[in-house]
Amino acid sequence: MTTIDAPRSAAPRRRGSNLEKWGWIYMRASGVLLVVLIFGHLFVNLLTGDGIHQLDFAFIVGKFASPFWQWWDVLMLWLALIHGANGMRTVINDYVTHTRTRQVLVGAVAVAAAFLILLGTLVVFTFDPCLGVTPDSSLWGMCQG
């Protein structure tokens, strides 16, 4: 007969960083921050001013002209993508039993998250509403000044 150790028995302690513990802590902390950031984003975009009727290209240009809103959106982007990637890592670790397949999938999630973080950050900080505007565009007058 095989016996199973009691759940709280003294198991050998591993030295070094505990990735799972830090991932668990990150999910809780980022979740709380994301709730604040997302509801702040929704409040400003949908409830202030003219509400949903104010949402147009000019509104977004105005928000991206402010460093405060740039950092707000970048923080929201980074936290959400890392939070989602960490969640996918957890799901992969739970359900994929083949070691090599698990490594490939976790690596693919990490590469996709890193690419989207890089691309999103570049879009927010290098956004130029006048890029590619021609004289027949409705933005021509705004971009000339």
Image (cartoon, rainbow, N blue to C red):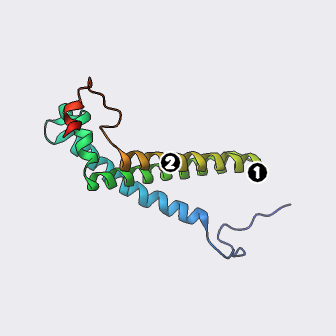
Could you say which is closer to the camera, residue 34 or residue 71? 71
Report the residue at 41% width, 49% height from top.
Answer: 77
Do tag 1 and tag 2 residues touch (Cβ < 8 Å)?
Answer: no
Secondary structure type for disc 1:
helix
Which image quarter is the C terminus in?
A: top left
Distance Cα–Cα, label 1 vs label 2: 22 Å
In primary-sequence order, the first of circles 1 and 2 is 2
Q: Residue at x 64, y 45 (%)?
A: 108
- Crowding at dot 2, Cα within 10 Å, few <14 / some 14-19 / many 20+, comes out as some
Write down the residue under mark 1. Answer: 99
**According to the image, label 2 marks what residue?**
84
Q: Position of residue 2 (x, y in %)?
A: 83, 61
Left or right? Give the position of 9 relative to 37: right
* Residue occupying image coordinates x 37% and y 47%: 126
Categorize mark 1 by other alpha carbons within 10 Å: few (<14), some (14-19), many (20+): few
* Amino acid at pointer 2: Gly
Residue most toward the left?
49
Residue, x 23% and y 37% (percent of image)? Answer: 143
Q: Amino acid at mark 1?
A: Thr
Q: Quarter of the image holding residue 56?
A: top left
